Each structure stands twice: as C-alpha cells, then as structure tokens.
Image (tube, rainbow, N blue to C red):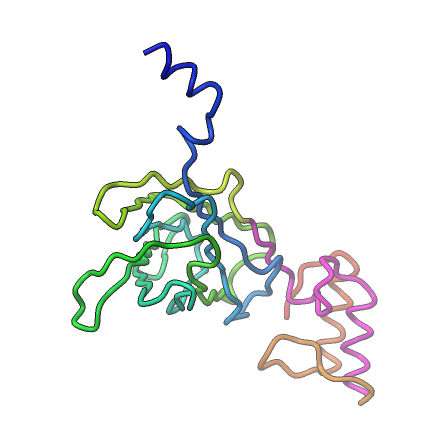
Amino acid sequence: MKILQVFALLFPSVVFAQPVLTVTGPVSMMPGQTATNFTVSLSGSAGQNLAAVQWSFSLPAGVTLGTPTTSAAILGASTYCGGAAPTAPVLPWTCLTVGLSASNVVTLLTMTDGTVATIPVSVASTVSPGSLSFPIMGIFGVSATGSPVGVNPASVPFVMRVLSRCDVNGDGAVNGIDASLVLNAVIGIGTCPLPSGMICTLQSVQKVLSAALGNACTL
C-alpha cells in the first residue's frame, strides 16, 4: 500500500489524468445572428482508450443549437444531439459522439485529441446584450471495451458576449463610429452594417446615435 501511495505522489498524471472536453466559439454575437459554430474539443485522451463520450450544455434562454457535424478525424463516428428549445434559463442539451457501423450497430472506435464536433448556434433577436456562460456538464465516457472512462469539463466555462444591435461594427461599444457607418450606407458610400434583413435609413441612423448617447438601442 505504501508503494502505491508513493507512486501516486511521484506520478500523479499517470494515476489521475483524465481526458478533458472544452467548448470554444465566437467571442461575440448579435441578437438574431445564426450559423456561427461552437467547437467541442478533446484533450488528454492518450492511453485512455476513449471510444464514446456524452455531454450536456446548459443553454441560456434564447440560444439554440443546430445539427452537429462530427470531426472527420474520428473515422466512422457520428454525433447526435437533442433537447427541446429552451423556454427558461439553464436547460440541458445533450450530445453523444460514438462510432457506428453501416448497420447502426455500435462499433467503438478509440478517439484521439482534437475536435470532436462543431455545432451551429443561434441567438434569438430577443436576447439582451451581456455575457452568456455555457458550462459543459453531465460528461460520461466509455472505452472500446465498454468500461467507463472519466472525462472532465474544462475548468473555466466558455463565455460569449451578446452585443447591442446598435454596435454595428462589433467592437463592444456603441458610439459615433457606429452612427457614421450607418449614415455612410444611407448616402451610398458604404454597405449597410445592420443585422441581416434590416435596411439602413435615416431613422436607423437616429436610433444608433441615440444609443451612442446612452439611451437604449431600439433597432
């Protein structure tokens, strides 16, 4: 027993190391923006024989995820995600990455470090500006022999900032530069920087300028 205790102290990474799932994505998005991908990545899997992994997101209200794409590096694997569109904050959305044969019989394939899957994300037009946190939880891993494998979430959850619609250049601040960009589009010396589907008019210039002066954005 003492020998094992000494070994654990001398080689903690060998005894306790576990794979880690990390979520990354866009630093910022605007309300109503879609099709920007989240990326789920795996690290520390060497020697773990990890073959399938399941995880869940906590989705803030107004944020939905689309159909995932499994990394081509995981040959034969597929990622499946499901969960109702959130109607309240912090609702789980669960995904599973596993290898499947053509006959849909589970064929467990050993994963390697790197991208596991990418998932489109959409932010509803009703989401208020601010920071949104996306902790990953409920992680469960299985080895190629069917044994459980411990997998940890990243120590710090992924955080994305939702910008104001009036922050047309996406720099995190609403000011005269944003109003100038919209005005330039109105007079024909630039493209309209407003979110998709919106038209630059003198009214929109007035709304962005009002927001730049400290009022609420009403675009």
What's the residue at 23%, 42% (across, down)?
147
- For the record, the magenta segment spans 159-187
x and y, in percent, of residue 54 in the image: 31, 51
What's the residue at 32%, 61% (across, down)?
81
Is 20 included in the stretch rendered in magenta? no
State left or right for residue 1 relative to residue 146: right
Furthest-front residue in this view: 3
Q: Nearest the camera: 90 or 147? A: 147
Is 180 included in the stretch rendered in magenta? yes
What's the residue at 16%, 72% (across, down)?
103
Q: Is residue 85 above or below residue 201?
A: above
x and y, in percent, of residue 172 in the image: 71, 57
State left or right for residue 195 relative to residue 181: left
What's the residue at 34%, 38% (across, down)?
150
Furthest-bottom residue in this view: 188
x and y, in percent, of residue 2 in the image: 36, 10
Q: Nearest the camera: 13 or 117? A: 13
The quarter of the displayed image where residue 63 is located: bottom left
Q: Nearest the camera: 10 or 199? A: 10
The total number of labels drawn is 0
x and y, in percent, of residue 25 in the image: 55, 58
State left or right for residue 82 relative to residue 38: left
Furthest-top residue in this view: 2
Which quadrant is home to the C terminus?
bottom right
Which quadrant is home to the N terminus?
top left
